Each structure stands twice: as structure tokens, then as C-alpha cells.
Image: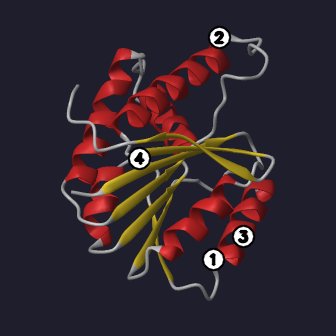
Amino acid sequence: MASLILITGGARSGKSGYALDRAEKCGGRRTFIATSPVTDPEMAERIGHHQEERRGRGWRLIEEQTDLPRAIADAGPGVILIDCLTLWVNNLLYRAERQGEVLTDAAMNAPCDQLLAACRKRDGTVFLVTNEVGMGIVPDNALARHYRDLIGRANRLLATAANEVVFVCCGIPMIIKQDSWYEGG
């Protein structure tokens, strides 16, 4: 059964770099699962920056925007780093809207449960990177508030199940939870 480490923090807080460093200390094969679509030139530049950060460090890349359980299964043995859950939730929300569906708070449980089930089937360590989006101002529109709420729900569910939760602020990691795998529901 995998050890699950959730790393959260604000935008540009240093959480991805921290996750890379922690994952590399685990040794063995490393797989990076990227969830970000290229939506515009600025996003392509951001993705390029993250790719450059990993270059020459022995990472295998899987790009998957929505089906994280499949990507985890495809990763094979070793350490997995998923960056980031915030974009994963965005992608799930976008897919639901394109299909004429509503991704409700309650409906967010299923993809999180599937993600956790895929992690439980593994040996090794899975790092999940996410953003803490609920600490700022309340968004001015319903869609942005709904998105914020979905991420908050996903973060709560995954943090409850994680062995360790690390909050990164100003480049400084703070362990806010450290215990054994949660078996409850």
C-alpha cells in the first residue's frame, strides 16, 4: 500500500519544487503525472518552466488531464508525483460542463475515491500537489466560487486519507499532518 503525501500551498509558494525534492529522496523509478492542458502561450511557458525544472533528473512523464487512476496504473512501480490536483479539478469541471452536466460537491467524491483506490493498490509513495485556494477573497462569480468549493472538497477528502500533509508557504514547508493511512470513509 502506497504512502500518500499531499502537498498544498498558494500559487508560486514552492510546493512543486518541494515535492520534486522529496520524491527524489525516495529513490528508484520516478513518474511525474502532469494534469495541465496547454490553453494559451502563457500556460505553455509555465509548463515549459516545470519541464525544465525536471530535465536531467530522471523523471518519466505521463500527461493526463482527467483519468488519474489510469495514469497511476500506467506508471508502473516507483514513486509518483501528480502535479496538480487543482488543474485536475478544473479539467473535471470543464468536462462535465461540455457534457451538459453539473459537477456537484457530492459528485466530487467519486473521482477522489477512485484516485485514492488507485493509490491504495500501489507500493511506494504517491505525492499529490494541490493549491490551497480557500484562503483568499471570495470570488465575484458563481462559477469561480463553485470551482473553489470543489477544490476545497477534494483537498479535504485527500488530506483525510493522506499519511502526511505539508503546507508550503513562502518556500517553507510545514508538516501539518503525519500519521498512518486512513482506512475510514
Upstream in the sequence, badge 4 or badge 3? 3
Q: Nearer the viewer, mark 2 or mark 1?
A: 1
For disc 4, the marked residue is 66
Upstream in the sequence, badge 4 or badge 1? 1
Q: Is residue 169 above or below residue 135?
A: below
For disc 2, the marked residue is 142
- Numbered marks: total: 4
Upstream in the sequence, badge 3 or badge 2? 3
Residue type, numbered disc 1 = Arg
Q: Quadrant of the rendered structure where residue 73 is? A: bottom left
Upstream in the sequence, badge 2 or badge 1? 1
Where does residue 161 sit, x and y in percent of width and height?
A: 34, 37
Upstream in the sequence, badge 3 or badge 1? 3
For disc 3, the marked residue is 48
Q: Mark 3 and mark 2: span between their CA atoms? A: 32 Å
Residue type, numbered disc 2 = Ala
Residue type, numbered disc 4 = Thr
Residue 54 — which label?
1
The answer to whether marks 3 and 2 mark residues whose Cβ atoms lie closer than 8 Å is no
Task: Give the class, few, some or many, for how many residues have Cα within 10 Å of label 2's Cα (few <14, many ≥20).
Answer: few
Q: Is residue 94 left or right of residue 68?
A: right
Tell me what residue is drawn at x 57 percent, y 16 percent: 146
Residue type, numbered disc 3 = Gly
Where does residue 137 sit, x and y in percent of width and height?
A: 79, 17
